[in-house]
Amino acid sequence: MKISSKSRYGLKACQVMAENYEGAQPIGLSVISRQAGVTDAYLEQIMILLRRAGIVDSVRGVSGGYYLSRPPEEITVGEVMRALEDGLEIAKCIHTPCADGAHCKTRDIWYKIYRSINKVLDDMTLKDMLGQQEEKE
């Protein structure tokens, strides 16, 4: 399984907002995009998905921008990834039966991998992610 650039940049954008989370003050799109290393246009597409998922909110206007809808300790990395990766389903048969209707013998393997990945991502919040970054520096 390969994580898309959308998820990598989306998680970096959330990192920027988490690092600057001070009572949910908005951060301009261009500031976030510069720090995340992505174009404004691509980041705007990502932010639409994060807004739909309830992870970020936005404010229009001169002092507007994006901010986390909740504190970093309340948002899991799994939430962010699922919002950007179509639920992180590694195989189509995770939630729907195989096309021929029979129970595929490999479905159990894919489901165990899916559950394991989601557990790791759901056990880590954006705040936890920041702490790990500080430990490496």
Image (cartoon, rainbow, N blue to C red):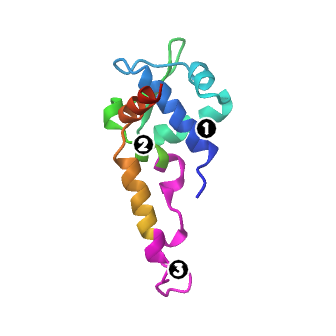
Residue 74: x and y in percent read 31, 36
Classed neighbour count for the residue bearing mark 2: other residues with Cα under 10 Å, few (<14), some (14–19), many (≥20) = many
Is there CB contact under 8 Å for labels 1 and 3? no
Is 136 situated above or below 20?
A: below
| SS at badge 1 | helix
- Residue 33, x across and y down, in percent: 61, 25
Q: Is residue 112 above or below residue 126?
A: below
Sequence-first tag of 2 and 3: 2
Q: Is residue 29 left or right of residue 73?
A: right
Find the magenta span and give its range: 82-110
Q: Position of residue 73 (x, y in %)?
A: 32, 33
What distance separates the C-alpha of mark 2 from that of mark 3? 29 Å
Q: Secondary structure at mark 2?
A: helix
Q: Of marks 1 and 3, which one's residue comes earlier in the chain?
A: 1
Which residue sits furthest top?
A: 62
Quadrant containing the N terminus is bottom right
Kindly indicate whether the residue at mark 3 contacts the one at mark 2 (C-beta within 8 angstroms): no
Q: Residue at x 44, y 56 (%)?
A: 117
Give residue 45's mark.
1
Q: Badge 3 is on which residue?
A: 98
**What residue is pinned by disc 2?**
77
**Residue 74, label in figure:** none
Q: Nearer the viewer, residue 56 or 113?
A: 113
* In magenta segment, residue 87: yes
Q: Amino acid at mark 2?
A: Val
Of circles 2 and 3, the one toward us is 2
- Residue 64 or residue 101, whichever sits in front: 101
Q: Amino acid at mark 1?
A: Gln
| Secondary structure at numbered mark 3 | loop
Q: Nearer the viewer, mark 1 or mark 2?
A: 2
User: As rendered, which of 63 and 119 lies closer to the eye?
Assistant: 119
Residue 85 among magenta residues: yes
